[in-house]
């Protein structure tokens, strides 16, 4: 069965569902270190990145909002690459 592409950048519904399903959505422990908090941020981001990518191509979302989502994604991608 072919996965349906839901955006012009090739993200599929299956990608989004799988990313969200991979997340541990329990609240973070209060005693985490800075490194642990950054690692959790990047783990959660990896799971919802397909959703953000799809949102950047939804025409109902204003262009400036889509650009902001893209800039946020780029910033977290750079952070992830630096660690």
Image: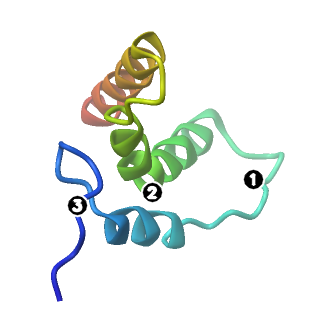
**With respect to residue 2, does 40 lie above or below?**
above
Marker disc for residue 28 = 1
Residue farthest along the right direction in this orientation? 30
Sooner in the amino-acid sequence: mark 2 or mark 3: 3
Q: Residue at x 26, y 47 (%)?
A: 7
SS assignment at label 3: loop
Residue farthest along the bottom direction in this orientation? 1
Residue beneath disc 3: 5
SS assignment at label 1: loop
Q: Nearer the viewer, mark 2 or mark 3?
A: 3
Sooner in the amino-acid sequence: mark 1 or mark 2: 1
Q: Residues within 10 Å of mark 3 (few under 14, many from 20)?
A: some
Sooner in the amino-acid sequence: mark 1 or mark 3: 3
Q: Residue at x 42, y 40 (%)?
A: 52
Q: Position of residue 39 (x, y in %)?
A: 50, 45
Marker disc for residue 47 = 2
Q: Residues within 10 Å of mark 1 (few under 14, many from 20)?
A: few
The answer for how far apart the CA atoms under marks 2 and 3 are is 18 Å
Q: Position of residue 18 (x, y in %)?
A: 41, 72
Q: Residue at x 47, y 17 (%)?
A: 62
Residue farthest along the front direction in this orientation? 60
**With 75 as the anchor, is 24 left or right in this view?**
right
The answer for how far apart the CA atoms under marks 1 and 3 are is 33 Å
**With 14 as the anchor, is 10 left or right in this view?**
left
The reply to whether dot 1 and dot 2 touch (C-beta < 8 Å) is: no
Q: Position of residue 67 (x, y in %)?
A: 37, 16
Q: Answer with the quarter of the image where residue 2 lies.
A: bottom left
Q: Answer with the quarter of the image where residue 47 lies.
A: bottom left
Q: Residues within 10 Å of mark 2 (few under 14, many from 20)?
A: many
**With respect to residue 38, does 15 lie above or below?**
below
Q: Position of residue 56 (x, y in %)?
A: 35, 32
């Amino acid at each position: 069965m072919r996965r349906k592409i839901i955006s012009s950048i090739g993200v599929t519904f299956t990608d989004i569902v799988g990313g969200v399903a991979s997340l541990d959505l329990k609240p973070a422990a209060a005693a985490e270190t800075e490194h642990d908090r950054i690692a959790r941020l990047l783990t959660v981001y990896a799971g919802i990145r397909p959703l953000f990518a799809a949102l950047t191509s939804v025409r109902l979302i204003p262009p400036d909002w889509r650009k902001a989502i893209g800039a946020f994604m780029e910033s977290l991608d750079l952070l992830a690459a630096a660690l």
